[in-house]
Amino acid sequence: YGGFVNKGIQIFSSMEKVHGVNPGNEHYACLVELLCRAGMITEAKDIAENMPFEPSSHVWESILCASLDHGDTRLAETVAERMLECEPKSPFPYLVLIK
């Protein structure tokens, strides 16, 4: 994914500037997933925290899984708390954190 991160960011940025399309939650989720898979978890979290609307649970799931894959349990706990704020009845944060 590392080779395509810059291209993905470029395409995402051009959506509004060039094509007049406001990125939606799905677009942000794709960008966050791309960054997470490239190991750029901090950057992904920064994007999620600065979205112009509340991130979907899928955005937080990507960051949660990536932080656990990279051994960052502190970030995983923080993200799990954010996920529970978005969807308090979701079992996913609990299931992932008990592993």
Image (cartoon, rainbow, N blue to C red):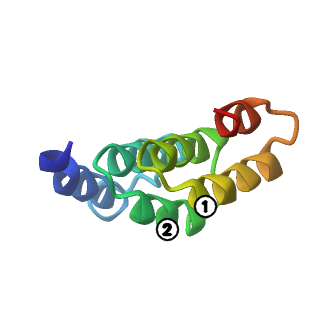
Quadrant position of the C terminus in the picture = top right
The residue where tag 1 is placed is 74
Rate crowding at label 1 as few (under 14), some (14 to 19) or many (20 or more) other CA atoms within 10 Å: few
Q: Residue at x 32, y 52 (%)?
A: 39
Q: Is residue 30 above or below residue 75?
A: above
Q: Nearer the viewer, residue 79 or 72?
A: 72
Q: Find residue 20 and report its image quarter.
A: bottom left
Q: Secondary structure at mark 1?
A: helix
Percent coordinates x, y for residue 2 in the rendering: 18, 49
Quadrant in the rendering for residue 6: bottom left
> What is the three-letter code of the residue carrying label 2?
Asp
Q: Amino acid at mark 1?
A: Arg
From what the image shows, is residue 86 above or below residue 54?
Answer: above
Of the residues tagged 1 and 2, which is closer to the observer?
Answer: 1
Q: Is residue 84 above or below residue 17?
A: above
Q: Which residue is mark 2?
A: 46
The Cα–Cα distance between marks 1 and 2, rounded to whole angstroms, is: 16 Å
Assess disc 2: are there few (<14), some (14-19) or many (≥20) residues with their C-alpha within 10 Å of its C-alpha.
few
When asked about the image quadrant of residue 27, the answer is top left
Residue appearing at x 26%, y 60% in the figure: 18
